[in-house]
Amino acid sequence: MFATMPSSIEHIRAGKLRALAVTTTARSEALPNVPPVGDFVPNYEASDTYGIGAPKNIPAEVVEKLNREVNAILADPRTKSRLADLGGTVLAGSPADFGKLIAAETEKWGKVVKFAGMKPE
């Protein structure tokens, strides 16, 4: 199965699941002995992204405050340590950075959908 690292890492560590590979481009610091799928399938990469969104018309100063506070939480050593323990990587940044990431992921996966000929049901 393909599962997210946070939902499966404790089962892997307990020996209840055996991880065959991670889907990121590089090995995970949380599971350093598990190779990336890209070692077997060239250029393979699929990773989760978590972020916070807001309605389009939210005032810029509210977005800036939320961004500042979230980045402060993500910079906290305890938060970073816990996320790393779950196999996560912190990508703090600006709202514009997050928008670029979403746009790039949408373009990447849009190509996959088109290539596979997928249609909405």
Image (cartoon, grey):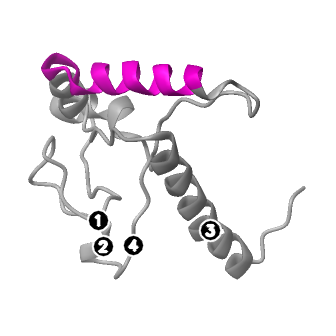
Give me the residue at 15% from left, 25% from top: 81
* CB-based contact (under 8 Å), mark 2 and mark 4: yes
Which label sits on residue 107? 3
Prevailing secondary structure of the magenta residues: helix
Specify whether 4 is left or right of 54: left
Give the residue type that dot 1 points to.
Thr
- Closer to the N terminus: mark 3 or mark 1? 1
The answer to whether residue 115 is above or below residue 90 is: below
Which residue bears the numbered disc 4? Answer: 44
Look at the numbered disc 3 and give the secondary structure of its residue: helix
Give the residue type that dot 3 points to.
Glu
* CB-based contact (under 8 Å), mark 1 and mark 2: yes
* Distance from the alpha carbon under mark 4 to that under mark 1: 7 Å
Of marks 1 and 2, the one in the foreground? 1
Q: Quadrant of residue 112?
A: bottom right
Look at the numbered disc 2 and give the secondary structure of its residue: helix
Q: Residues within 10 Å of mark 3 (few under 14, many from 20)?
A: few
Q: Position of residue 37 (x, y in %)?
A: 31, 67
Q: How many marks?
A: 4
- Closer to the N terminus: mark 2 or mark 4? 2
Q: Position of residue 73 (x, y in %)?
A: 30, 19
Q: Residues within 10 Å of mark 1 (few under 14, many from 20)?
A: some
- Closer to the N terminus: mark 4 or mark 1? 1
Magenta-drawn segment? 61-79
Residue 62 within the magenta-colored segment of the rendering: yes
Q: Along the line of sight, which residue is nearer the eye, 86 or 56?
A: 56
Q: Along the line of sight, which residue is nearer the eye, 41 or 96?
A: 96
Look at the numbered disc 4 and give the secondary structure of its residue: loop
* Distance from the alpha carbon under mark 3 to that under mark 2: 20 Å
Which residue bears the numbered disc 1? Answer: 25
Give me the residue at 61% from left, 31% from top: 53
Residue at the far left in the pictured view: 33
